Amino acid sequence: MQQIQWRDRFNIGVELIDHAHRQLFSIVQKIMDLYVERHEDKFACVEGIKYFKAYALQHFAEEEAYMREIGYPDYLVHKKAHDKMRYETLPELERLLYDSDFSTEMVQRFIGVCTGWLTGHILMEDQAIIGGRNNKSASIPLDDGLSAIQAVIISPLQELLGCQLQFIGSYSTKDLILNEQDYELIYRSQEGDRLQVVLAIGQQTLLYVAGLMLGMNFYEKNDIVRFAIQEMAQNLIQRASVGLGQHPDKFHLESSRFLEHEEFAKLFQERAPQHSLLFRVEHEIFALCINLNATSDFSGS
């Protein structure tokens, strides 16, 4: 059974806010227990999702009041993130749930999106309210040839994982990643720029990394993992955009899919990405391949 484990690194040090975050995670756990794990009591699941939404909206209002009270300088930017969740993400998730008659897949999507968004928001935005976010460069030696986009990705990745992340060089499809899973995310800006990100990671490492980020134990790849990764990736893209002097909402997710490794290897060989970064976490390795191009990505599309 998947279990959410509250971790101290999720605390920001303001009890009103930390208590609300713990409650939101607790609600998600109950939804998983009732419907995803036991596949029973649909009514309780529906009520749990309604309660999550109501509690989240109440929490946003209280957190915004606290930021105004202390004169938090990035209040408007933070509120904009809340408003997107309020008026776009949660209503869309609710629509999908009712359209599917609360299918297990849509409930998993709800859990993945909400948990992924909440975790990324806590670690990257809420920590900044009390100065807990590390805005300095990552404590990883950067070679002279390391590009700006590489530098701005390493630090927020470490914030998400909550553990030491080692950059070990450029990735090649010849690098052996056991039981490799290749997950592609395509983003597009209003100006038409296209950003392609491919995560190349072993399945067990994927579950381990997802667990580190979300405070959950995962035993299999499912829609919770998939949609949580999407939310984490969006947070990462936003932080990288800011680091490169761009608006945090420059890129929006257009599509995502798991690729067969043979397909990814062929695309990689035909046209290598602009940036291929290889990392070590614990005893495993994973890679991020990134291509930003106004007309095409490394898949040639």
Image (cartoon, rainbow, N blue to C red):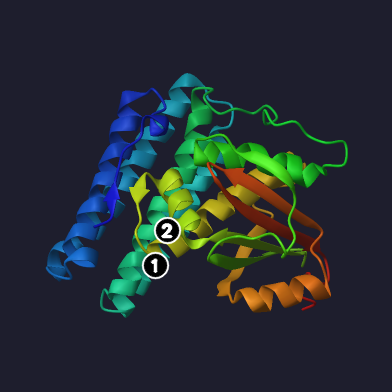
Q: Position of residue 98 (x, y in %)?
A: 29, 74
Q: Which mark is residue 135?
A: none
Residue at numbered disc 1: 222
Circle 1: residue type: Asn
User: Residue at point 38% right, 41% down?
Assistant: 60
Q: Residue furthest right?
A: 144
The quadrant the C terminus occupies is bottom right
Say whether residue 42 is visible.
yes
Mark 1 in CB contact with mark 2 (< 8 angstroms): no
Whichever of callouts 1 and 2 sits on the residue coming sooner in the sequence is 2
User: Residue at point 46% right, 64% down?
Assistant: 226
Q: Secondary structure under badge 1?
A: loop
Circle 2: residue type: Val
Q: Residues within 10 Å of mark 2 (few under 14, many from 20)?
A: many
- In terms of depth relative to the viewer, which is nearer, 272 or 235? 272
Asked which quadrant contains residue 48, the reply is bottom left
Say whether residue 189 is visible.
no
Asked which quadrant contains residue 295, the reply is bottom right
The quadrant the N terminus occupies is bottom left
Q: Position of residue 163 (x, y in %)?
A: 52, 35
Residue at numbered disc 2: 113
- In terms of depth relative to the viewer, which is nearer, 155 or 203? 203
How many angstroms separate mark 1 from mark 2 (CA)?
13 Å
Is 151 located above or below residue 228 in the figure? above
Asked which quadrant contains residue 134, the reply is top right
Q: Residue furthest top?
A: 70
Q: Position of residue 4 (x, y in %)?
A: 29, 47
